[in-house]
Image: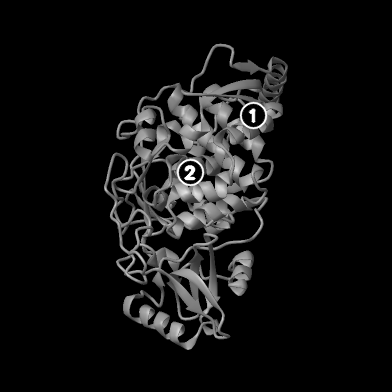
Amino acid sequence: MKRFAILLALGSIGYATYHYRETLLKTVKPYASLAVAKVTGGKGLDFAEGLSFSLTSPSVQDEGEVNRTWTFSDGSQMNAILLSADLKKAQFRVPESQGVGEVPLGNLSVKDREEIQQWIETEGTDGVAGYPVPLKTHRWPSQWRVNADTVPLRQIELSDEWQSTHFDITNHAGINRASLESITLICEAVDGALNALPLPLPVNWGRDLSQRRKIVIEDSKGYNGVEGSAGYWDGRTGIVHINADALVEPDLQLVVFEFDKPEKLQKYDVIVHEVTHQSTAALMYLGVPAWVSEGIAEYMAATQFAPAYYEFSNTHVAVRHHVNKRLLGDRIVKDRRMNVARIEKLMNRDIVEWNSYAEKRDVMSFLQYNESLILIDYFLHRDHPDGVHFRRYLECVLSGVPEPEARDLHLLRGRHYIDIERDLFELWRPLGFTFQFRDRSDLLAGDVEIDWEAEDVKRTIATERAMNGTSRER
């Protein structure tokens, strides 16, 4: 047991994470008759086309058959649940600590090693059996970016169909190639940024690696999303729909690149949010509450500093800007009072309840997105600088621990929800947000204080740039 505790502390450097994406949700039987529970459905839980999801979480187990004693080659033993194995190593969860780690097969007794190898032969796919959790232990990156020259894009026989490395893109809106390349770059960068984080995120779980995902770019006439919105992910089909009219100016230039115009509201973050949902769709089928998947999607949207360039340091600046611009555009805010739902309410809100609020399109609708972003940022950077507690929470959920138990063990850790509310209040008050936690989120008169002196400076800069541009044209 002591030996395994060391493994849990060190994690799994060099773990072959590319295997789990193909094997997690295929029809392979997990070890020791682990029962597979099918999703019961509900609003917003339709399965995306091409995904082979067949379970909410591998947490439904035959009593007395999964947690058992395993013996090492030196005779020492541990009580653990076998999660997965390949020909070199096995991954376990220890119920006593609810930690996840792995052991080289050569370190196990001959009997246990042969039993695991037999399981791989009879139930495995491509030499992997069970449901591996992608273990990561590296530090949180300060930034991540992709080289635009490494993102290929080709047109299919002069049609409106295009292909990049990971996407089939339908250009119904007829936007020009330069704008299409920019959108493609943004989409292609999402998976790389997600995988760069030290989190066991289920990126593309249940999707064959050779299968491209689908993006459809439409104009407002063919767009079925919320009027004026820039895009949405359809959970029934797995397709991300992008509204070109919300992103492309009449001169066919993407708003995304108009950084020198402070009056322009950048909307490309919506693409990042929706493609993040497409990449991590498994979160919605693995029993996590809605704030987790929505908060992660908002976090990725907020931290993309420029197309395919993510800035993960000083995230409070990106979070504050992202939250304020949803309501105020590019206005500079001196202070904002945030009347948001109590943390206990938010952390127990399932996707059905979340969608019921979102469909109303009122203040409460967008405030739940704001609050989920702030809560995710808290657990990723404030509760621990490298998000270790949140990482262990996800490891537990993905390895079969019921979400409420994983939350109590790793996120609350003996604290009450009001303690987290107090932390958020003290953290954000000097940073521009004053939180008031209520039964219902709301925006009240006097909640926003604009920094008019900074606004005057911004207008002066914009005017000077405009005059300089006119002078150059002459």
The reply to whether residue 173 is visible in this rendering is yes
Which numbered circle lies on residue 84? none
Residue 39 percent across, percent down from the top left: 29, 51
Residue sitting nearer the eye, 51 or 462:
51
Q: Amino acid at mark 2?
A: Val
Q: Are marks 2 and 1 in contact (CB under 8 Å)?
A: no
Q: Does residue 283 appear to the left or right of 17 in the view shown?
A: left
Q: From this viewpoint, is residue 304 visible?
A: no
Q: How many numbered tags mark residues here?
A: 2
Q: Which residue is mark 2?
A: 292
Q: Nearer the viewer, residue 71 or 58?
A: 71
- Answer above or below: position of 68 versus 344: below
Q: Is residue 470 left or right of residue 273?
A: right
Which mark lies nearer to you, 2 or 1? 1
Percent x, y of residue 80:
48, 69
The residue sitting at 29% across, 66% down in the picture is 27
Viewport quadrant of the N terminus: bottom right
Residue type (three-letter) at the residue carrying disc 1: Phe
In the rendered image, the quadrant that contains the C terminus is top right
Marks 2/1: CA–CA distance: 20 Å
Farthest residue, direction bottom: 110
Question: In the image, is residue 460 above or below residue 93?
Answer: above
Q: Relative to residue 246, is residue 46 drawn left or right?
A: left
Counting from the top left corner in percent of width and height, residue 96 is at 53, 62
* N-term-proximal mark, 2 vs 1: 2
Q: Nearer the viewer, residue 141 or 376?
A: 376
Residue drawn at (51%, 29%) of the image: 342
Residue at screen point 36% across, 60% down = 206
Element type at mark 1 = helix
Q: Which residue is mark 1?
A: 425
Q: Residues within 10 Å of mark 1 (few under 14, many from 20)?
A: some
